[in-house]
Amino acid sequence: MLGKVDPNTSAVRDFGFLRAIDYDRCIACGTCEAVCSFLNSGVTYIKLFEVSKGFSRPISCFHCRKAPCIHACPTGAMRKDDDGAVYIEESKCIGCLACLAACPFGIPSLSSVTKTAIKCDLCKDLRGHGLEPACYAMCPSEAILYGKAENVIELLQKRSLTKVIGLRYELSK
Amino acid sequence: MKFTFMCKKEMVQSAGPHGRGKVAIVGAGSAGLAAAGYLVCQGYEVDVYDKLPLPGGLMTFAIPAFRISIKSVMEGFEDLRDNFSVKFTLNTKVFKKDGVRHDEGDEFIKNVIDLKELVDSYDAVLITTGTWRSRKMNIAGEDSKGVYTALEYLFLLRSYSMGYSEHKPSKARKVIVVGGGLSAIDAAEESLLSGADEVYLVYRRTINEAPAGPFEINRLRRLGVRWMELALPKKIIADASGRVKEVELIRMRLGEPDSSGRPRPIPIEGSEFTLEADIVIVAIGELPTPPAQEEYLGIKLDRRGRILVNEKYRTGNEKVFAAGDVVSGPSKVGNAVFLGLNAAMNMHLYLTSKRLTQGSG
């Protein structure tokens, strides 16, 4: 089946990589948006929205483990790479935005140049050179996390624990 | 912050014995460091100058550590220095030599270099000197002991906590912070954390107009900060030793929208009242600090002191580019990073086309 991932790769067995945003740590400085936009000629795949007056936070593709966009795509353009990043193969995309209809978060959008769907691919080019997604690499508040899924989840849990009991036991960070 | 997020050391090709060229960056804040990362990835030799003892600018010396990770900024700096041979010249202010202006954060300066020297000896120069001067209220008693600007206060706390200053900011009992932006929020939160008994945050309009927004202000209120809107300090009253004792304020009401589009705050005659305070922190905005007071080497300023650049981030001097808050006025880290990266890219394009036309590529 088109777009289906091979269950035998180790990346799938250990849930691949995860990029998560710790919204408590985020200070809405916009660095993620700035580097993303710089790398993508003015288009940004991680975007800040003002949720209420004076309070903004970024949103980007969650790279779902069971990504509905991959199943909705009629041409097999929406794919998942070995690290677990959901990306679009431009040559196969017809710009129908079935992926957007399927996405629970309204992430995919359309390129005004190629008329194909566009979205975050966790900096596929950079990762191809052994580098990291730029939003993660440049976040000054350590709010954007990236790595092996189990490590990211553990770090988030540790941060939550510190928050919950930190004050009670007067622990320093 | 991995300022070299676009490359690995092994990927960088240097063209010829001297690489692609030599670039100086004045100001090691978010804009300057982002630009340095881009330029070393393109194969340039980059020297960075900064007046402070550590790079990072406001990220290191003003923005509270609970917002921005110093560790992350320092890792980014060390990566530039150790893996990409960026030369950092710290404690050094770059300015027009005759008539050096005193700005905030100048305490650690050991050397002054004339901007002209850099312009003469590098292929291109990027100015990212930020906003290191604070607006004053211009009221009586503002020069009393215990009156700080937000930048001064935060700088003092950060310098002390990082071991660069032995002068510990005195513990305050009652603090009044004046302003409604993020510097005011940070100053109020830091003074609360450093043990003040009572912290007032005073703003001349209402929570709805405050630039920091209701979320941040209400968060501080939950921490115990007292929010006082529609009030403006009229004068600061000092005791016999010249130390602030109390602040006279006047109540305000909102009038018709002014040039900023927000309702104009209008003083209510006869509504004066006083509040006790032993520290007053003025957080009503910062001003650009370009490396000359007025036009210099063709680099022009606008009437607010910001460096004028064209769409390619180039100043009036062909070799000199500028980016960050010194171009945009006070903004956020993301904006500074964005301007820094774009200026760096334009410097690369400029130097590449120059090399090609001179046939020495």
Image (cartoon, coloured by chain):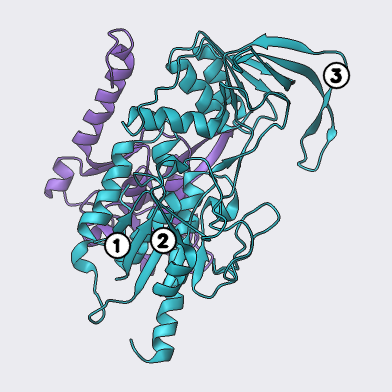
Chain colours: A purple, B cyan
| Amino acid type at image mark 2 | Ile
Q: Is residue B209 left or right of residue A150?
A: right
Q: Are marks 1 and 2 in contact (CB under 8 Å)?
A: no
As measured in the structure, the alpha-carbon distance from the residue carrying label 1 to the one carrying label 3 is 61 Å
Give the mark, 2 or 3, whose residue is nearer the N terminus.
Answer: 2
Which structural element holds mark 3?
loop
Looking at the rendered image, the disc whose residue lies closer to the viewer, 1 or 2, is 2
Q: Are marks 1 and 3 in contact (CB under 8 Å)?
A: no
Camera-side residue of A75 and B257: B257
**Chain of the residue on which disc 2 is drawn:** B
In the picture of the structure, the residue carrying the numbered disc 1 is A125
Give the quadrant of residue B74: top left
The answer to whether tags 1 and 2 share a subunit is no
Q: Is residue A31 left or right of residue B71?
A: right
Q: What residue appears at the point 61 percent right and 56 percent down from the top-left corner? A: B293
- Crowd rating for badge 3 (residues with CA inside 10 Å; few <14, some 14–19, many 20+): some
The residue sitting at the bottom extreme is: B359
State whether residue B50 is above or below residue B204.
below
The residue sitting at the front extreme is: B240
In the picture of the structure, the residue carrying the numbered disc 2 is B25
Q: Position of residue B84 (x, y in %)?
A: 24, 61
Looking at the rendered image, the disc whose residue lies closer to the viewer, 2 or 3, is 2
The answer to whether tags 1 and 3 share a subunit is no
State whether residue B173 is above or below residue B339.
above
Q: Position of residue B95 (x, y in %)?
A: 50, 58
| Amino acid type at image mark 1 | Asp
Looking at the rendered image, the disc whose residue lies closer to the viewer, 1 or 3, is 3
- Residue B268's label in the rendered image is 3
Q: Position of residue A141 (x, y in %)?
A: 37, 37
Q: Are marks 2 and 3 in contact (CB under 8 Å)?
A: no
State whether residue B161 is above or below residue B108.
above
